Amino acid sequence: MIKDSDCRSWFSAADLLTQDASAPVALIGAPLGLGSITPGRCDLAPSAVRAAMKRMSVYDLETETDLSALRVFDRGDADIADLEPAQALAPLTACIAPLTQTHALTIALGGNNAITRPCAHALDPALQRVGVLTLDAHFDLRDTDCGLTNGNPIQALLDDGLPGAHIAQIGLLPFANTRKAHEKAKAAGVYVATAAACKAQGLAAIAENALARLAARCDLIHVDFDIDVIERAAMPGAPGARPGGVSAQDFFDAARLICAHPKVRSVDLTEFDPSLDVASVGALTAARWACEALAGFLKR
């Protein structure tokens, strides 16, 4: 018998998850599904992504990056699946904040995009030292007078006191946003890069510019990876995805670059709805994203 035969045992990305709280990276599920503009089951995403990680190896042959020595503390899921975004703010912030204080990187698996607000609050309750970068087809600047949803976490953060100059939004699509939202972003001083600019210059290059801008102003950075920034044909499991989005490969490249930045203390993956997935495309994309984030972290 061959010792350590890989036909008898498969060391997967899921095997990196541990109950050892001393691990340098933490992962928490944030199964927030209520409050979505398009009703769905984003609350199913954390378990679907963990399951898909079993199908990912820990070795990247292109860069010879090996994740096998890294461990990720799996905090489990926050108990928020039955809560609206406004109700989830305090408990989710309370779950994430201790992780960001004891781990160099915290990964939050959403859930819908409303989890971005508590992630930012967890890093800095005063919102004066934190910056927020979003990779998203949408501004998420809808008005909040009708309540909190996955369509207005950035507006809610502005209302909470986060300076507009501490926000960068990249990957924004035509005919997926309103003039009002664009004018809000410009008036607040938000850094904006369209999907066309990201494709012309490279999503990773645009992300690098955005991170440099935020790092000059902020001590801590949270990054929202809204999976609907990806081209809809490649991401049918994202209800908000549209034709014309970025490629999955660009999404992966940006994730690795972003998670290598020392000021990035937390990231989230949002808007993946397993109930809409086709042939596990979304689940495997999300699992690959997690591997890319970890590979980026190893470059610090």
Image (cartoon, grey):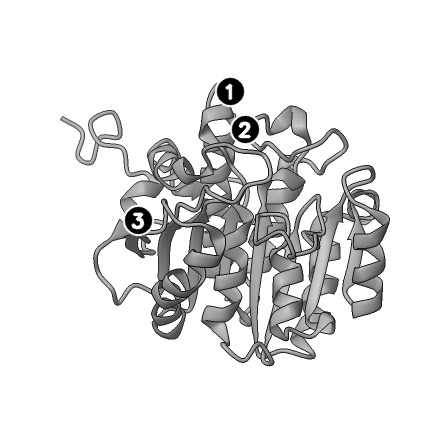
Residue that badge 2 annotates: 237
Question: What's the distance in space between the residues labelled 2 and 3, CA to CA?
Answer: 25 Å
SS assignment at label 2:
loop
Are dots 2 and 1 in contact, CB under 8 Å? Answer: yes
> Which amino acid lies under the numbered mark 1 shown in the image of this protein?
Val
Residue that badge 3 annotates: 16
Residue 17 position within the rendered picture, expressed as x and y whole percent measured from the top left = 29, 49
Question: What's the distance in space between the residues labelled 3 and 1, CA to CA?
Answer: 26 Å
SS assignment at label 1:
loop
Mark 3 or mark 1, which has the lower sequence index?
3
Residue that badge 1 annotates: 278
Numbered tag placed on residue 18 in the rendering: none
Q: Quick one: which residue is furthest to the top in this view?
A: 279
Are dots 3 and 1 in contact, CB under 8 Å? Answer: no
Mark 2 or mark 3, which has the lower sequence index?
3
Residue 210 position within the rendered picture, expressed as x and y whole percent measured from the top left = 72, 63
> Which amino acid lies under the numbered mark 3 shown in the image of this protein?
Leu
SS assignment at label 3:
helix
Comparing 108 with 155, the one in front is 155
Question: What's the distance in space between the residues labelled 2 and 1, CA to CA?
Answer: 7 Å
Identify the residue shown where x is 79% and y is 42%.
199
Residue 167 position within the rendered picture, expressed as x and y whole percent measured from the top left = 69, 66
Q: Please say whether residue 193 is visible from this viewpoint.
A: yes
